[in-house]
Image (tube, rainbow, N blue to C red):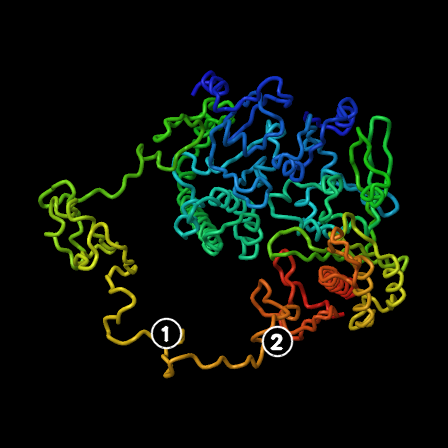
């Protein structure tokens, strides 16, 4: 996109220019995002960098999770420092080098960090992933061999409600190992080159003059002088142009297509290529037989095995009888089940007990409920310690507010905020 | 506005006192995003490099720039200088916050849970406020309690911290194991030259609290000559435990967490007060034990 094009985008209603006269002070400035100069015009000075990146520059990689700096989904780098994009006033980040997650996948290929996150299963809903990728990228820039604890401390500002962080930590180690192996390989290659290099020197003493005569390799141009127009990509769905953002799958020049349907024998439309399934009956899936509008809808369970039509459930007008998830139709509940025995609840340990009803629960002999008058009266929970977050139950403690003493030999009851167990020095 | 020197910044603030000085912006932008604050103008302090370091002054004082980031304070060279302040900076938040959050911003925001505030209170630090008319030094406790607040057009520039060359401890209790706001925090510094103990409790009140009587009492219980010797016990464990109770009772009032609107007469300490007192007591006892180890 040309500079005029970007300026034109600034006048479009989607760019939310502050209306003159609404009392909000505005500013125009230029952000350097992933090496590209991006002008921002008439933006309210209170807009966060996250808002400007997403709403004005179309870089939607950083996510807006909490707007309080708690979740880390908006992590970007400003001047090489990992920051929460929602807590940086964009007007004050002018002339800073801003790196977003879109810059990780330069050239259209995913970076090793993103690949490792995807491979290790650290991406489930994906909302935290851009921030997580930036945090891992930032960590590995500063620390090439992070320990488990260092990785945990570096990622402690990125909340993920899906994966439980294990896979993200595994991805950190994977990338660190990969990069170490790559460095070793490069060193080995350099050593091999050196071993062969002296012969070349001795062969041609005039080689030094040749080297001097050779033109110097072109110095890498400063990024600012290189390109002023960020690459523009057309979003396939919305049709909006996105500048500077490199879709992951741009290398193929196309969207990643789903699995292509295999050509089938008859090649008819609506034929399901499901020959591999056990119990597959091609006759039932022949053209036009899968769904008969006249006979009503017959549910087919998800595992694809055709079930015999329900005897007791006609299509419409009769009461609905629930079908269990395993897809086998059952008789109504008030009759005797198929195996012919009346239903008896089985306890969780799997051994059916003999009597018709449960025996009385034994009284609690140990534990925090021991002294509680369990059935009948309300339990006073003051004495109950609960289980601390690290999973080690606290030893019993009088709840009269006296000194809390950790029993000797047990782990520290309170873990400090940074997650490190400090030396056992506090039983002074 | 992005001034690059302190003089420029002070002058810019003098000409437009309504501008909000922004260093890291982590507290400010949280309020702006939530709609609680609509700044008329912003004065970015991130380019003032002279405020981002520290220097030494005669009389054993470190002069810390207000733009010193929390991440910088966590580094070993600073931790050797003022260990409690480094501990407070380390637990202040996730890396994303600590990379930009500054010492001066923590003081100027004066949040009840500000982690560096109890440490600065215990160290009896002084802050320098620079205005167009000149500079003035204010004890940080006067600034926090509103006895001598920042006036319009003044910029918090330097924090003077005495170098005590003695153990200092900062402990913080949080609701989770990751970075979080403190439910209670205790900073305790020893001053062996004066044979004194200074303690400040944060996050239980709008400002950090100093239990002065408990400090004076426990200073008399410490065997100062035995401190630092191998295998010595500079303080009786029962005295340390009693110190914790003393601090907790002094800092958490009986009516903590009570519903004032209910109109019920107070009947002893509330459950919230008891729970918080226990937290504070444990923190204070551990802090004393670690300082005297």
The part of the image, by quadrant, that contains residue B70 is top right
Please tell me which residue lies in front, A248 or A275. A275
Q: Quadrant of the C terminus of chain A?
A: bottom right
Location of residue B253 with respect to A143 vertically, above or below: below
The part of the image, by quadrant, that contains residue B166 is bottom right
Q: Residue at x 76, y 52 (%)?
A: B260
Location of residue A300 with respect to A361 vertically, above or below: above
Is residue B168 visible from the viewing direction of this image?
Answer: no
Left or right of B101: which side holds A191? Answer: left
Question: Please, which residue is most extreme toward the top here?
Answer: A4
Q: Residue at x 82, y 65 (%)?
A: B243
Q: Separation of disc 2 and disc 1 at Cα?
A: 29 Å
Give yes or no for contact between labels 2 and 1 (Cβ–Cβ under 8 Å). Answer: no
Location of residue A97 with respect to B187 vertically, above or below: above
Q: Secondary structure at mark 2?
A: loop
- Would you call the spot at circle 2 few (<14 residues within 10 Å), some (14-19), or many (20 or more)? some
Left or right of A110: which side holds B270? Answer: right
The residue pinned by badge 2 equals A372
The residue pinned by badge 1 equals A345
Please tell me which residue lies in front, A401 or A234. A401
Q: Residue at x 84, y 57 (%)?
A: B211
Q: Quadrant of the N terminus of chain A?
A: top left
Is residue B187 visible from the viewing direction of this image?
Answer: yes
Left or right of B26: which side holds A187? Answer: left
Return the x and y of residue A94 as percentages of the image width and height. 60, 27
Chain at tag 2: A
- Would you call the spot at circle 1 few (<14 residues within 10 Å), some (14-19), or many (20 or more)? few
Return the x and y of residue B4 as percentages of the image width and height. 71, 27
Return the x and y of residue A31 as percentages of the image width and height. 55, 27
Chain at tag 1: A
Question: Please, which residue is most extreme toward the bottom here?
Answer: A354
């Amino acid at each position: 996109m040309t500079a005029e094009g970007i300026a034109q985008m600034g006048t479009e209603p989607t760019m939310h220019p502050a209306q003159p006269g609404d009392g909000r002070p505005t500013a125009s400035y230029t952000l350097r995002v992933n090496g590209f100069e991006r002008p921002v015009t008439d933006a309210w000075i209170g807009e966060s960098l996250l808002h400007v990146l997403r709403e004005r520059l179309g870089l939607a990689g950083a996510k807006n999770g909490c707007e309080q700096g708690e979740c880390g989904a908006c992590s970007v780098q400003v001047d090489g420092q990992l920051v929460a994009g929602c807590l940086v006033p964009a007007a004050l980040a002018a002339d800073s080098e801003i790196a977003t997650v879109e810059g990780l996948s330069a050239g259209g290929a995913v970076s090793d960090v993103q690949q490792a996150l995807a491979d290790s299963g650290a991406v489930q809903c994906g909302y935290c992933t851009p921030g997580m990728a930036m945090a891992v990228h930032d960590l590995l820039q500063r620390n090439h061999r992070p320990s488990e604890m260092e990785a945990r401390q570096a990622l402690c500002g990125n909340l993920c409600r899906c994966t439980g962080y294990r896979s993200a930590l595994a991805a950190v180690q994977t990338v660190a190992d990969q990069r170490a192996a790559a460095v070793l390989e490069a060193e080995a290659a350099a050593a091999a080159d050196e071993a062969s290099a002296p012969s070349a020197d001795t062969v041609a003493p005039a080689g030094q003059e040749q080297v001097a005569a050779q033109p110097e390799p072109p110095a890498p141009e400063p990024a600012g002088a290189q390109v002023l127009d960020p690459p523009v990509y057309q979003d396939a769905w919305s049709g909006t142009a996105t500048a500077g953002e490199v879709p992951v799958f741009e290398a193929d020049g196309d969207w990643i297509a789903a699995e292509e349907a295999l050509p089938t024998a008859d090649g008819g439309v609506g034929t399901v290529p499901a020959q591999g399934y056990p119990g597959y009956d091609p006759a039932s899936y022949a053209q036009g037989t899968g769904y008969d509008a006249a006979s009503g809808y017959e549910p087919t369970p998800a595992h694809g095995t055709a079930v015999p039509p329900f005897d007791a459930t006609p299509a419409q007008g009769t009461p609905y009888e629930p079908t269990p998830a395993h897809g086998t139709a059952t008789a109504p509940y008030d009759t005797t089940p198929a195996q012919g025995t009346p239903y008896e609840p089985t306890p969780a340990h799997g051994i059916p007990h003999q009597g018709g009803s449960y025996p009385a629960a034994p009284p609690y002999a140990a534990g925090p409920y021991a002294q509680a008058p369990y059935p009948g009266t309300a339990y006073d929970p003051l004495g109950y310690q609960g289980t601390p977050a690290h999973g080690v139950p606290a030893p019993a403690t009088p709840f009269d507010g006296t000194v809390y003493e950790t029993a000797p030999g047990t782990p520290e009851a309170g873990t400090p905020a940074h997650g490190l167990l400090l030396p056992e020095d506090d039983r002074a | 506005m992005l001034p690059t020197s302190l003089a420029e910044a002070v002058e810019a603030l003098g000409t437009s006192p309504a501008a909000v000085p922004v260093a890291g912006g982590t507290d400010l932008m949280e309020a702006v995003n939530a709609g609680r604050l609509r700044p008329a103008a912003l004065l970015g302090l991130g380019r003032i490099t002279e405020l981002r370091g520290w220097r030494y002054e005669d009389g054993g004082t470190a002069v810390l720039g207000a733009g010193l980031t929390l991440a910088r304070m966590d580094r070993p060279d600073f931790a050797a200088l003022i260990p409690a302040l480094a501990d407070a900076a380390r637990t202040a938040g996730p890396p994303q916050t600590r990379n930009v959050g500054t010492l001066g911003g923590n003081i100027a925001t004066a949040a009840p849970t500000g982690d560096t505030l109890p440490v600065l209170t215990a160290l009896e630090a002084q802050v320098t406020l620079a205005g167009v008319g000149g500079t003035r030094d204010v004890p940080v406790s006067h600034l926090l309690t509103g006895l001598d607040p920042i006036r319009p057009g003044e910029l918090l520039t330097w924090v003077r911290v005495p170098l005590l060359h003695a153990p200092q401890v900062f402990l913080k209790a949080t609701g989770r194991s990751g970075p979080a706001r403190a439910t209670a925090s205790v900073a305790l510094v020893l001053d062996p030259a004066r044979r004194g103990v200074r303690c400040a409790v944060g996050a239980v009140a709008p400002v950090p609290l100093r239990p002065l009587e408990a400090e004076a009492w426990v200073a008399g219980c410490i065997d100062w000559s035995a401190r630092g010797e191998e295998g010595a016990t500079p303080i009786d464990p029962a005295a340390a435990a009693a110190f914790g109770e003393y601090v907790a009772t002094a800092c958490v009032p009986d009516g903590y967490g009570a519903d004032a609107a209910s109109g019920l007469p107070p009947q002893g300490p509330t459950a919230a007060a008891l729970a918080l007192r226990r937290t504070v007591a444990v923190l204070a006892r551990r802090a004393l034990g670690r300082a005297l180890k």
